[in-house]
Image (cartoon, rainbow, N blue to C red):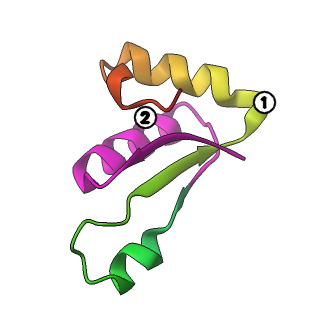
Amino acid sequence: MIEIMRTNDLVLISFVESLLKEARIAHFVADSNMSILEGSLGVLARRVMVDEARATEARQLLKDAGIEQELRK
């Protein structure tokens, strides 16, 4: 799996997860537990990971949704 996005914005993560789920793109949000352990100060960003074979499709989906600026290069 590769990282396509990193953010502290829980609403954005929820939106991205919804888009990926609807498109049937397997994904995983990494570092969720670490963010909880650090006390929810927002210091540690959560990473959205997708299968490398579908990364291009996932990136295009997020671009089409208007959140291209959140994508990792």
Snapshot quadrant of residue 53: top right
Residue 5 drawn at (x, y percent): 47, 40
Left-right relation of 26 to 35: right
Q: Secondary structure at mark 1?
A: helix
The Cα–Cα distance between marks 1 and 2, rounded to whole angstroms, is: 17 Å
Between 15 and 49, the one nearer to me in the picture: 49
Which span of residues is magenta-colored? 1-28
Amino acid tagged 2: Leu
* 66 inside magenta stretch: no
**What residue is at 41 percent from the left and 17 percent from the top?**
63
Q: Nearer the viewer, mark 1 or mark 2?
A: 1
Left-right relation of 14 to 41: right
Q: Which residue is mark 1?
A: 53
Residue 30 drawn at (x, y percent): 54, 62
**What residue is at 50 percent from the left and 37 percent from the top?**
20
Q: Secondary structure at mark 2?
A: helix
Up-down relation of residue 11 to residue 54 (above or below): below
Image disc number at residue 19? 2
